[in-house]
Amino acid sequence: MTATKLPLILLAEDDLKTSNLLTVYLEREGYRTIAAYDGQQAIDQHRMRNPDFVVLDVMLPHKDGWEVCREIRQHSEVPVLFLTARDDESDRLLGLGLGADDYVLKPFSPREVVARIKGILRRIRAVNIHDAASDVLTHGALVLDATKRRVSLDGESVELTPIEYTLLLTLMSTPGRVFQRDEIIARLYPHGELVVDRVVDVHVGKLRQKIEVDPADPKYIITVRGTGYRFADRQSEFGS
């Protein structure tokens, strides 16, 4: 029997004490870890080691966390959790808009960081389990193959983050149903993470950029003003 490989977590944190402390807590929970102490090291380590998760400090030397996340997202949809001392909503929305899955404010408890990581990885596993019992969902040129956890548009593969995939699966599974923002937040962050309503709009915007021909005039994910979002329920909504 082949042993299951333990998740590998990249810790990109320039403070050695913080990095070592998180390493101790994560390895105590059974995770493997690698460390990077500046932005370029984080990018290099990600390319060389292909980790299963990235913990990313915003204020890194040489290249900050925003830039590191942008570069990682050019070729990978690995889950990313930001560590930031900047308690500003615009910064949080920027990180989520770049494709991060969550953020933790400094100062923090190492237990909280570990809990957030475990929650995100658990959510990904839960989605994969759901996939195994699901059918292929098709609407126009958009196809979500839940058994393989793949999304394609006009036959071309679309790379989604775990959050974006869960969002699309949620909406696409019940076309026409209106989901309120609070309900979407509960689906995307099922373990009670504190996020603002605008986070949903950020994720929807990123998803539209990937699946809509014209994100400014969406045909798949429809805004229901004052309420939330729904997936198009009629082929006629796509036009002729």
Image (cartoon, rainbow, N blue to C red):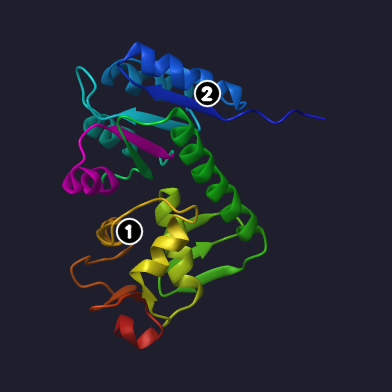
Quarter of the figure with the C terminus:
bottom left
The answer for how far apart the CA atoms under marks 1 and 2 are is 34 Å
Q: Residue at x 55, y 54 (%)?
A: 149
71 versus 35 height, above or below: below
Q: Upstream in the sequence, badge 1 or badge 2?
A: 2
Where does residue 99 sit, x and y in percent of width and height?
Answer: 32, 45
Q: Which mark is residue 25?
A: 2
Q: Amino acid at mark 2?
A: Tyr
Q: Which mark is residue 75?
A: none
Q: Residue at x 24, y 32 (%)?
A: 85
Quarter of the figure with the N terminus:
top right
Magenta region? 79-97
Quadrant hosting residue 29 = top right
223 versus 56 height, above or below: below
**Horizontally, is 49 left or right of 195 in the view?**
right
Q: Amino acid at mark 1?
A: Leu
Choose between 59 and 167: the one closer to the eye: 59
Going by the picture, which residue comes out furthest to the right?
Answer: 1
Q: Residue at x 34, y 29 (%)?
A: 56
**Horizontally, is 43 left or right of 62 in the view?**
right
174 versus 103 height, above or below: below
Q: Is residue 80 magenta?
A: yes
Where does residue 192 sit, x and y in percent of width and height?
Answer: 45, 54
Where does residue 207 sit, x and y in percent of width and height?
Answer: 32, 58
Kindly state the secondary structure of the residue where label 1 is placed.
Answer: helix
Q: Is residue 154 visible?
A: no
Q: Look at mark 1 in the image and give the residue it sits on.
A: 207
Quadrant hosting residue 43 = top left
Q: Is residue 133 visible?
A: yes
6 versus 194 height, above or below: above
Kindly state the secondary structure of the residue where label 2 is placed.
Answer: helix
Going by the picture, which residue comes out furthest to the top?
Answer: 16
